Amino acid sequence: MTLRIAGWESTYENNRTKELKTLSWVPIPNRMDGDGYTELVDHKDGAAHLGAWIAIVQIASKCDPRGTLLRDGGRPHTSESLARISRLPKKIFDEAISRFIDIGWLSSQDTENTVDVVT
């Protein structure tokens, strides 16, 4: 299963980032009153999941194509690889990824068919 950040181009890219081949920074929206944000943090582990989300956005900004969680060689990232890169606990990614899909921030793509989550 390959994970992709929903709305990557419109949310995490701007005129400056689109000109860059590689990113050393990524613009992150600061809206804290939307349904997605409030649903995410209104959870006993919401703060940890928000941290995992920021790590995922930063990792995705360095993937090819940007916004799709693929490792070198085209292998999909997993909770384990995300944890290794970010140095956050794997358990947080295990719990948070399904929440990100439910909220509509991530979509999952299988090799045979694609499932997009509408936000």
Image (cartoon, rainbow, N blue to C red):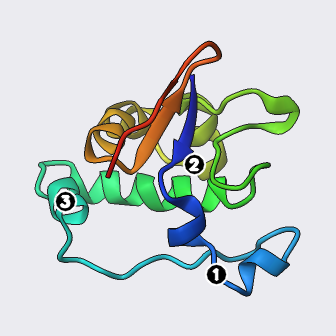
Q: Earlier in the sequence, mark 3 or mark 2?
A: 3
Q: Earlier in the sequence, mark 1 or mark 2?
A: 1
Q: Residues within 10 Å of mark 3 (few under 14, many from 20)?
A: some
Q: Are marks 1 and 3 in contact (CB under 8 Å)?
A: no
Q: Return the residue at label 2.
A: 87
Q: Earlier in the sequence, mark 1 or mark 3?
A: 1
Q: Return the residue at label 3.
A: 41
Q: CA distance from mark 1 to mark 3?
A: 26 Å
Which of labels 1 and 2 is toward the front?
1
Residue 36 - label: none
Q: Amino acid at mark 3?
A: Val
Using the image, determine if residue 82 lies above or below residue 56.
Answer: above
Q: Residue at x 83, y 80 (%)?
A: 19
Q: Amino acid at mark 2?
A: Arg
Q: CA distance from mark 1 to mark 2?
A: 28 Å
Q: Amino acid at mark 1?
A: Asn
Based on the displayed image, in which of its 4 quarters is residue 33 positioned? Answer: bottom left
Which of labels 3 and 2 is toward the front?
3
User: Which residue reaches farthest top?
Assistant: 112
Q: How many marks?
A: 3
Q: Are marks 1 and 2 in contact (CB under 8 Å)?
A: no
Residue 14 - label: 1
Q: Residue at x 20, y 48 (%)?
A: 45
Say what secondary structure mark 2 lies in.
Answer: loop
Q: Residues within 10 Å of mark 1 (few under 14, many from 20)?
A: few
Query: x%, y% of residue 49?
Result: 32, 51
